Amino acid sequence: MVAEDMAKILRLLVISGALIAALLLLTSGPGTRFGLWQYGTGFLMMRIAFFVGLGAALLAVLLLVVPKTRAMGAVPLVVTLVLGLGTAYLPWSGVQKVRSLPYIHDISTDTTNPPGFVAVLPLRVDAPNPPEYLGEEVASQQREAYPDISTLALAIPTDQAFERALAVAEGMGWEIVAREPSDGRIEATETTFWFGFKDDVVIRIAKAEGGSRLDVRSKSRVGMSDVGANAERIRKFLKTLQG
């Protein structure tokens, strides 16, 4: 009787562990986004979710193997196994992606003379990442990881290029901070979906032979690695602009 009670308690703990891990994972990002805790706490919650979820999944396998605990009901243990593995997989896959990419958070189509931030500077006063471009140290890593990110040539006048770029930026849901047609400069901020990180974008449009030359720079306010977000943002913008 005591052994059976212990088995029931262990099953309950394992199932509860998987549920707690999933809850930690699901709230880690939104809690950061809405200011309930700092992003470091959100990352810690994801790390805990990984270990708790993995542990719950392994124990669920063990309980499924033992005939006595399996006989108490296999379905909850199978659900626990799937939930635990799924919860552990998401943080694990995120870490693998971070490790596969350079630890940079400032991407520009022009790494020699990147567009400079002006209007967003007051918004970055308290940001851990400074607005300045770090030069060849960043540029060399970008060229190796994202060789396709480059200046876009447009066969239209600068005023038309400006209006098209502004429309695309607005269509992508960016918060427009500045629009300066005379300088050929558009500045904007995009808030990431899960953690609510603020990434700043500056678009520079200049006259060129046969039309216009357009450059884009996107930089995160926090984090050593942007997990490829800035490069993807620029790619999407340029693809939409050309489409």
Image (tube, rainbow, N blue to C red):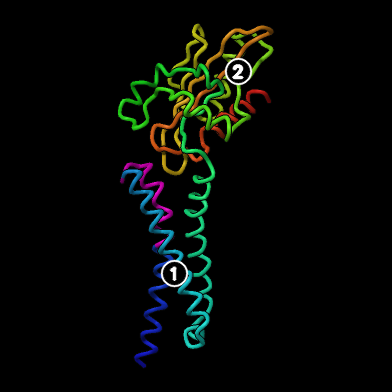
Segment colored magenta: 21-37
Q: Residues within 10 Å of mark 2 (few under 14, many from 20)?
A: some
239 relative to 116, above or below: below
| Helix, strand or loop for disc 1 | helix
56 within the magenta span: no
Q: Earlier in the sequence, mark 2 or mark 1?
A: 1
Please provide percent x and percent y for residue 230: 51, 32
Residue at position x 51%, y 75% in the image: 61
86 relative to 200, above or below: below
Please provide percent x and percent y for residue 208: 63, 8
Q: Amino acid at mark 2?
A: Arg
The quadrant of the rendering that contains the C terminus is top right
| Helix, strand or loop for disc 2 | helix
Q: Amino acid at mark 1?
A: Ala
Please provide percent x and percent y for residue 72: 48, 84
Q: Which one is in front in this view, the residue at disc 2 or the one at disc 1?
A: 1
Residue on which the image places disc 2: 164
Q: Which mark is residue 39?
A: none
